[in-house]
Image (spheres, helix red, strand yellow):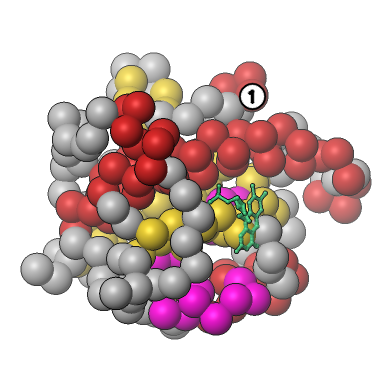
């Protein structure tokens, strides 16, 4: 089934919060993979994946499936698909299209990134993290955002383990080139990327 679209945005189905293998089995099966099939994820898988990464799990408090230091919630998850680049909007659980170019190849330095159907890019908003002038961001400015991202990436790994999907978190990136391809503002900083797809047969 193809993704249902509203304009160029993608409306995701409700996440299935009752599914999955037992947690201990997911820990047992979590692994990094570097060989991918080009087959696309289903709507439901993409929905569940993004909800696991950074979905809202306590609507009244506006809180997420992953923690964030001081609840600053400065992280965003971008999604590079064949059909374009999208921003995951957790509040309404949909994908807002940023542009319609396929930038999967630019999301990393390894060949599989353009074969796999999904590449997530975790981005910190320095302003939300309390740094008002991006030019003054020092080397330690992204420390808490990096830790926050670790939780999100692990949620993705565990969802993939449960769903028998292949996954790898990736720091080997050309950050300036990718920031340009994503049309990021100076206060938005890439932390890491993560590839998801079906394992190569
Ligand atoms: C911060 C971080 C950055 C990583 N960057 C890459 C990367 O750029 N490319 C890659 O193939 N794997 C990358 N990995 C995956 C590690 O190589 C992998 O976790 C490690 O080899 C252990 O394998 P496992 O995840 O299957 O346990 C990264 C892992 C972490 C935690």
Between 111 and 184, the one lying in front of the other is 111
Residue 42 in the image, given as x and y percentages of width and height: 19, 62
* Label 1 residue near ligand 1, CB within 8 Å: no
Residue 46, by quadrant, is bottom left
Near mark 1 (Cα within 10 A), the count class, few <14, some 14-19 or many ≥20, is: few
Residue 16 in the image, given as x and y percentages of width and height: 17, 38
Give the residue displayed 34% in from the left and 66% down from the top.
199
Between 69 and 187, the one lying in front of the other is 69
The residue labelled by disc 1 is 69
Q: Is residue 12 above or below residue 21?
A: below
Give the residue displayed 40% in from the left and 51% down from the top.
88
Asked whether 97 falls inside the magenta stretch, the response is: no
Give the residue displayed 61% in from the left and 72% down from the top.
108
Q: Is residue 87 above or below residue 116?
A: above
Horizontal side of residue 38 vs 1, given as left or right: right
Horizontal side of residue 176 vs 190, given as left or right: right
Horizontal side of residue 29 vs 130, given as left or right: left
Horizontal side of residue 90 vs 187, given as left or right: left
Residue 127 in the image, given as x and y percentages of width and height: 70, 41
- SS category of the residue bearing label 1: helix
Between 67 and 87, the one lying in front of the other is 67
Asked whether 117 falls inside the magenta stretch, the response is: yes
Res 197 visible: yes
Q: Quadrant of the C terminus?
A: bottom left
Give the residue displayed 32% in from the left and 56% down from the top.
165
Q: Residue furthest left?
A: 1
Residue 175, by quadrant, is bottom right
Which portion, as a residue range, is magenta? 108-123
């Amino acid at each position: 089934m193809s993704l249902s679209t509203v304009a160029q945005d993608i409306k995701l189905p409700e996440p299935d919060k009752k599914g999955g293998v037992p947690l201990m089995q997911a820990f047992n099966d979590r692994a990094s993979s570097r060989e991918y099939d080009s087959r696309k994820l289903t709507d439901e898988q993409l929905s569940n994946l993004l909800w696991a990464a950074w979905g809202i799990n306590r609507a009244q408090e506006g809180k997420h499936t992953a923690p964030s230091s001081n609840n600053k919630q400065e992280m965003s998850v971008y999604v590079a698909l064949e059909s374009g680049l999208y921003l995951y909007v957790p509040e309404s659980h949909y994908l807002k299209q940023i542009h319609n170019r396929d930038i999967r190849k630019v999301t990393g330095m390894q060949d599989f990134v353009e074969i796999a159907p999904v590449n997530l890019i975790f981005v910190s908003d320095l302003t939300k993290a309390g740094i008002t002038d991006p030019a003054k961001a020092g080397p330690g400015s992204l420390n808490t955002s990096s830790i926050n991202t670790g939780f999100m990436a692990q949620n993705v790994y565990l969802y993939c383990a449960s769903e028998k999907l292949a996954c790898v978190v990736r720091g080997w990136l050309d950050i300036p080139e990718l920031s340009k391809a994503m049309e990021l503002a100076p206060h938005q900083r890439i932390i890491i990327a993560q590839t998801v797809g079906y394992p190569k047969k």
